Image: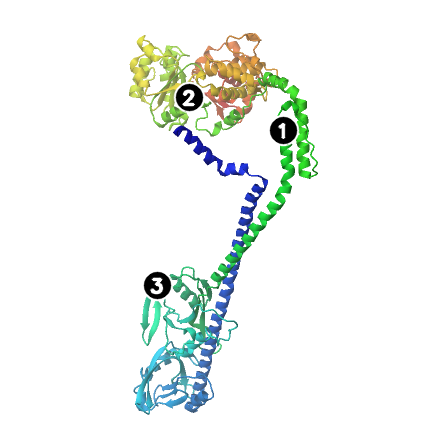
Amino acid sequence: MSENTQPTEHNNSSMFSPKRLWNRTGLRGKLLLSLLPTILIIILIVGAASYKVSKDYIRIALGRTVAMQNLAIVHDIEMFMNNCATDLRYFALSKQKNEDISIQFQNMIMAGGIPYYELAYIPASTGKPQIQINKSGVVTKLDDAALGRVSPNPLLELEKISTLKDREVQPSYIREITYPVQNNKNGNMLIKEKVVRFYIKTLDSKGHPDGIMFLSVKAEKLRNFLTLYDSKRSPLWSFQRSDELRFSYFVDPQGWILFQSIPKEDDSSELTSFLARQGYQGTLGKAEHNVAFRPSEIHADYWERIGKIQKKEKGLEFLFHESGQYSSTIPTLAYAPVCFKKTPGGESEVYGAIIYTDRSVLPKVAGYDFMSILLVVSGIAVAATILVVLFFGRSLTRPIREFAAVMSEQTSLDQLKEVDLPYKDNDLQVLQKAFNRIIRHVNSQYILMKAKDEKLVAINSQEKADMKKETQALANLDVTVIPEIIGYGKQINNLKNEILKAAEVDVDVLIYGETGTGKQLVAEAVHNNSARREKPFISVNCGALDENLLLDALFGHVKGAFSDAKTDRNGAFIEAHGGTLFLDEIQSASLKVQQSLLRAIASRRLKPLGSDKEISFDIRIIVATNADLTTLIKEKLFREDLYYRLKVLMIQTPALREHPESIPLLSLYYMKQAENLTDKKDIALSRGAVAKLKSYQWPGNVRELVNSITRAVVMANNKLIQADEIKLEGESCSYAEDEHPESVKQSFASEETISPDEDTLEENMDSDQLQSTSLNDRQLKAWKVIRTMDSVSRNEYQKIVGGRLPSRTAIYDLQILVKAGKLRKTGRGPSTRYIVDE
């Protein structure tokens, strides 16, 4: 029962999947499913963009209103203070002319001028102070007894004489003054007032300083300017304001908040700062002004404003991070400095600043209204879309449904009929014509389909094989970690990993593999990826030399060691100092050579032939063999101690039959080399040829593959090599061996490295081999490259001509170039080089 339940649940879940629902929905349903979300998304995007723009502009407009109101307050206070300075200068001039300033002060008050609170003259030497105070419009001059009870003592104001210049008016900040005032009921009583004083230095009739004069106004007079602009009596009142909290406050350049506006037209005369200091931590109260507040330095934004105010800068801010009870709104804050000119026409100085805060919720209310309108618009758009789709969907889909019904009736391939529906709809006519063309084409081709399929199968193998992957792999060889090793698959990847691991450590390596599997390439790859890559890589083929020549090639000799030893010769161990020495076909070395190798490898020191002096060397030894050394050890043909000395790390090169996936890539690589050798271009393999190469077992491995590919390229009559043109072992060749051109014979030579003993190879050449000094095509091509170089070695020459040229042929070519006077030979053995002599 459980077995039947699980498929049912799976079917039910897949039945209601979005993909299945979409596939089973008709045209009208798809129109609804596609149009409704699209329209809603468009409306929401447009609405969000419109809301953002409108909100930003509302905030900008609100900010400009706040800034304008703040500047109006600043302007009125500056005008008021300048008028106070002008009046004080007038009184000072009157006193200099010995006019009665008391009468002038009384007349000014009665004429409705600025309601100053006090006017005082304090002489510097002789004479007594004159102080008049304004009490409810009545000016009272203090007598000597009352002067003694004034606090602070007016005589202390004389200290400011030294700081005042001629005609300079200096305002103070809020000061608390105590005056005795006569009262009919209580006699003399003390009245405390907070005032702002304006000071000026007085002069006598001769223009000499004789005292100081000050004029003061009650601090609440300045506060009333702030309150005025928050009330309906404001000069800027032009519309009904909402009930959100708005207030302004006065700060001095040192950051003290001195007073704030009174909310809701409160008639209280007390100065306050409770709204201005909300959300701040700091110091409350200072001398002569107990409600002053100075925020602490932790409020960086506040002190940044004070810094700008000190520089006479004004600004507008939107306080997004305001804390406290007003976090539901975004306050708008404007600030501007209040400047005062101490002298007429002089430079204005910052006296303080007005900071205005408006916590209007207008952007928030506008956002709510906007969202309501957006919801209504979205609902109307959805309803209209549904109605339009339902109304037009049926008439739009009728021709398509009928066309689909006619098509579904034609189930037999050999009885297809053309469709002819009466509708003149352009889209349906295009669809109908296209379908009828398909029917006519299918009917005309149906009979030929089977024959064509059979023909395609027959010629498929003759088509060009798709080797884009291999071509790209060859193009990327230069950027791979080990470009010397070409191939794909697990075997090649394991080989490359073993090479990289061996390159990381500086130990000896034994490479084992069948003939033609690229053991020398592995050795070179280990060297090129090791820390010794910048040092020499010397290769010696132990199977190419007899015992004595091999000992000489390995260990060298000194002059006079034997009859033909006319100069000293460094052996391969010394030539490879700091680098790598590769010993190929190590199983071919005699027991005597093996004993010498063991002693040198164990001690890392050697004695050249004929020398009593030991020479130390620092090399890494890599040996290669295609024989089973353990079997040779049992047969006493190979030293067991040497085997274990060499086998620190072992790398096995895989046979080609073990990674057939690499055959197409290798074939393409060696086919490009054969093209360079034969001056043919754009040779390609057919699919059948690739299949034949991959199915062969390749007992000769890569060397046999190279020979087969080269032979096929040489003998190819067309640019596409077919399967029958690939001649494998056991198949008859279509040409005689002696018909091969010399260059082709050389390409079939062994890819294994031949001994680097170039002197011995030259001595074994027949003398008549070097009679001709004319250069063949290969030598001419090589010379064009060599002449751009300073010198060349035999290995470099082999790479110049394609990398597969046998060592003997390379030495032959170099000797021809020497005989022709183009090169000059220097050095012996592995250090031999050919210097460009033109």
Q: Amino acid under label 3?
A: Glu
Q: Position of residue 13 (x, y in %)?
A: 45, 36
Q: Earlier in the sequence, mark 2 or mark 1?
A: 1
Residue at 50% of width from left, 71% of height from top?
A: 240
What separation in Å lies between label 2 and label 3 (alpha carbons)? 72 Å
Residue 587 drawn at (x, y percent): 36, 12
How far across and how far down the image is residue 138, in percent?
Answer: 40, 89
Which residue is located at x 53 percent, y 8 percent?
731
Q: Which of the two labelled residues, at mark 3 and mark 1, occupies the earlier sequence position?
A: 3
Please tell me whether mark 3 sits on a helix, a strand or a loop: loop
Q: Are marks 2 and 3 in contact (CB under 8 Å)?
A: no
Residue type, label 2: Gln
Q: Which residue is label 2 attached to?
A: 491
Q: Secondary structure at mark 1?
A: helix
Q: Amino acid at mark 1?
A: Glu
Q: Is residue 378 left or right of residue 574?
A: right
Closer to the camera: disc 3 or disc 1?
1
Q: Secondary structure at mark 2?
A: helix
Quarter of the image where the N terminus is located: top left
Res. 164 in view = no
What's the image's color scheme?
rainbow
Residue beneath disc 3: 297
In this view of the protein, can residue 78 be seen by the observer? yes
Q: CA distance from mark 3 to mark 1?
A: 87 Å
In terms of image quadrants, where is residue 163? bottom left
- The answer to which of 23 and 573 lies nearer the viewer is 23
Above or below: residue 164 compared with residue 44: below
Q: Which residue is mark 1?
A: 409
Circles 2, 1 touching at the beta carbon (< 8 Å): no
Give the position of the C terminus as an image quadrant: top right
